[in-house]
Image (cartoon, rainbow, N blue to C red):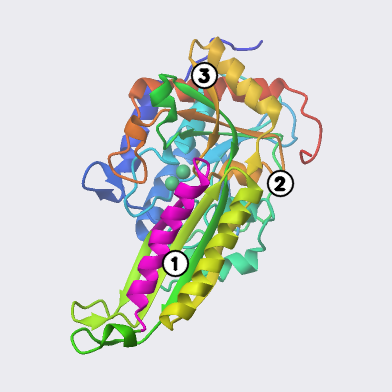
Amino acid sequence: MTHDDLRIDGDRLLRRIGDLAAIGPIDGGGSCRLALTDEDRDGRDLVVTWMHDLGLDVAIDGIGNVVAVRPGRSDGPPVMTGSHIDTVRTGGRYDGNLGVLAGLEVLETLTERGIETEHPFAVAFFTDEEGARFPPDMLGSLVYVGGMGIEDALDITGIDGAVVGDELDRIGYRGPYPCPGPAPHAFVELHIEQGPVLEAEGVTIGAVTGVQGISWTEYTVTGQSNHAGTTPMHLRHDAGFAAAGIVTHVRELATRMGDRQVATVGRLELHPDLVNVVAGSAVLTVDLRNTDEPLLQQAEADLAGYVADLAAAEGVEITSRSLARFEPVVFDERVVDTVAATAERLGRTVSRMPSGAGHDAQMLARVCPTGMVFVPSRDGISHNPAEHTDADDLVAGADVLLQVMLALDRADLGEGAPS
Ligand code: GLV
Ligand code: MN
Ligand code: MN
């Protein structure tokens, strides 16, 4: 039996998305559940309750990743899906949440219909995908695949001075299961696109071919705080001016390098942050991304050279700290083809496309055949409470996820990590 006609319960999926979005609500219909805060805990508790209600085996590991499993005919590695339920401070209701709740929906649909699969089926939510409080992003899935040791991860200090291990203990999500976790048979993640491409093309499903490389750096500028009225311009060591130079330079750099290079200063703090005081220090972050690793390295080198010249010219000290560095990832062709063929069979239009955002799937790709399914984002808006995807597209995405997981269950993908 192939269960080609099986579909998820769209109303139940939409209801759960609404219930989860109501935890940590913010103006405009989005949510704020920064990783390991009380709101994140409350969101976790709700999803774990749903997992238990479905009779799934729920395992929590040492970094707080939660994996819920429905047994298969055999005991081997599961066909896994999942994503994250933490958000940025200005989060929408779909980023991450859709993938987790659609995964739950897949497992519930199978249970409701009494369908047996060959492999176990698993749905996971990974800790701190956003990295907005505790860099790097995709922290939980990085630890799950052994890309960072658990002790290093537990020691990470967040932007508010909190420490990952302490916060995990405080919210009760430091679990007994070991990291790294077992490699799945295959992993596929459903996510909103978070960009404008599908909408612009009038296409409803993205078969994601890979994820662009990410480079996050924090710069600390130390100059001389002084009186804004009395300090002659040529005697200033202005941390605010230097920070503004970096902001402007990364925009120019991206424009010069062309389409594939994006560059953002998303965080900037000036001290003492007063109208009549030359800023004595500044802390800012730069996010560089490119689908091409040599080009990303070129952008990093260009910026490093500029920062050194800037420090000398303004007479300030600029130190840097890497917050995240992940090379571009190419997904398994067999999984990408399965996503595209499945979506077409379900009557959807499909585009093959790379992902601009980071995702847990890019970490899982290190240990098993992996792919992703995208659905459109209205106006390409995300990391914003205005984030929106039409209900029809959300439900279609979950149906594609279900059918892709069933196809991967039947597929002979060989053993071990992909080459
Ligand atoms: C994480 O989700 C990112 O793309 O910044
Ligand atoms: Mn996400
Ligand atoms: Mn996000």
**Start and end of the magenta stretch?**
237-265
Circle 3: element type: strand
- Neighbor class of circle 3 (other Cα within 10 Å; few <14, some 14-19, many 20+) is many
Q: Which residue of the protein is positioned furthest toward the front in this rendering?
A: 234
**Where does label 3 land, which residue?**
350
**Where does label 2 land, which residue?**
182
Residue 85: image location, x then y, percent: 44, 46
Residue 170 disc label: 1
Residue 278: image location, x then y, percent: 27, 81
C-alpha span from label 1 to label 2:
26 Å
C-alpha span from label 3 to label 1:
44 Å
Q: Which residue of the protein is positioned furthest toward the right in this rendering?
A: 415
Main secondary-structure element of the magenta-colored stretch: helix
Q: Is residue 405 above or below residue 291?
A: above
Left or right, residue 220 beside residue 185 = left
Quarter occupied by the N terminus: top right
What amino acid is labelled 1 in the image?
Arg
